Amino acid sequence: MTICAPPMSARQIVQAITARTSTAEKQVEAALARIAALDGKLNSCTRVLGERALAKARALDQRIAAGEQVGPLAGVPFGAKDLFDIAGLPTTGGAASRLQASPASNDAEAIARMEQADAILVATCNMDEFAYGFATINAHHGTTRNPHAFDRLAGGSSGGSAAVVAAGILPLSLGSDTNGSIRVPASLCGVYGLKPTHGALPIEGVLPFVRSFDDIGPFAANLEDCALAWQVLGGDASGDFAADDKPLRVGVLGGFFAEHDEADLTTALDAIAQALGNCPAVVLDDVKIARSAAYLITAYEGGQLHLEALRDDPLAFDPATRARLIAGAIMPPEYYAASLAIKRDFYATTMQAFDKFDVLIAPATPAVAPLIDDPTISINGASMAARAHLGIFTQPLSFIGLPSLAVPLLRPGRLPLGVQLAAAPGNDKLCFQLARQLEDLGLTGVSPAPSPSSPMQPSNAGVNM
């Protein structure tokens, strides 16, 4: 048995519940049972909200029985990264130091919108402390494992949110993406994940990291569910994202984005370019400089945000997080100002590319999921720390607020790899339209993972030899 895709997709759950062949209570009970049975291996969830979820499910079933109209996600269980406010609980951001924080008075706006659409929150999901990392190695909650190979990382910082979907435990989850924290784990776990146009989806009630880049978005095991969650979060769940048949002008990002050691990525991108009519290569100027500037802005804003807590109790932080936050906190302000100027210039340069292209394609990660015991990746022959560098290709795009959809390459029996589809701000829909085309061409889609109840795969599972 495989459990990569949920037993039912979000749309199938809604159809079953509204047709009264299932109930919201049954769907929530099944999700809770999957968490109990499978998450011990994966470590994707930090808190299970069974009592809350069952109460909401029973109330929804009563409304359905009374003939009331229900929302587009009626009865769909979902998870949320452990930095979304949940009424009555502390918002931890994955930090042990916040376990005793004052409880949130309200749900985050994103959770409220999901539940206004009658989805049901069942769990919070593991993450890198304060969202600072690409690995989901958490000093308090432990490391989230990749459903495709349990000795490998799930990616981060929204690794728990990606793994819980990739393992088939939940059909949907919410994460946050600052420099790649949705797209990286989506790629490594082989699911869909959206980093929307900056500021397009509600960030209220989400613990901040770097407000210049912070966004929230959904994970899903199929494209339609991801699009539906995006529409719900955006306040409009009407319409078909792929209804426009106008041909898309597509380019493949080269130069900096081709600097990796993963041959499968080169082969896949070449195949995509050929299938779409020999898409031209696009080389953006100053990408390395832009990524460096993004690093500095991240460090500075993150350090300033946590400066008071660092002064009060630095040992309360995860050592890896603490060192990076302190480095940012002592950064000269003029470095930050110079980085903002680079951001403005890089935005202007990149927008020129969108005069010629609707969507740009690039790798989402430079490699497959690294081993937990050796969390490094190879880029141009150099070994680099995965926690800092898995987002090397996502960071320059979120730096200027582009919408970017992580799409899994179709790789049955191999470790996942993903590409990201980026458009100009406000054109998120175009990313979904191209993703549909790639699925129809048989180049992308979710490939099943083995059941977490089966023996651990060998460490080279899915790697081309």
Image: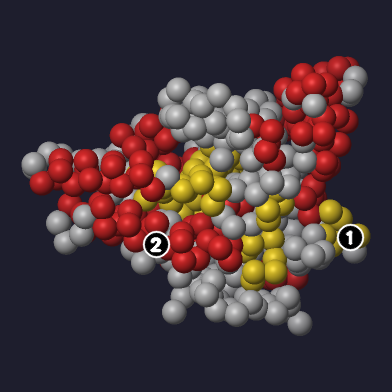
Q: Do labels 1 and 2 touch, CB within 8 Å?
A: no
Indicate the position of residue 251 as horizontal and vertical percent values. 63, 52
Q: Position of residue 442 (x, y in %)?
A: 48, 71
Q: Secondary structure at mark 1?
A: strand
Residue 315 horizontal/vertical position (percent)? 82, 34
Residue 415, quarter of the rendered image? bottom right
Secondary structure type for disc 2:
helix
Marks 1 and 2, how far apart in space? 40 Å
Say which residue label 1 marks.
383
**Residue under pointer 2:** 33
- Residue type at mark 1: give it: Ser
Question: Residue 407, located in which quarter of the rendered image?
Answer: bottom right
For image coordinates 77% across by 34% down, the residue present is 316
Q: In the orientation shown, which residue stands out farthest toward the bottom?
A: 465
Q: Is residue 102 above or below residue 406?
A: above
Q: Is residue 182 visible?
A: yes
Compared across the picture, whether 119 is left or right of 354 comes to left
Q: Residue at x 39, y 62 (%)?
A: 33
Q: Nearer the viewer, mark 1 or mark 2?
A: 2
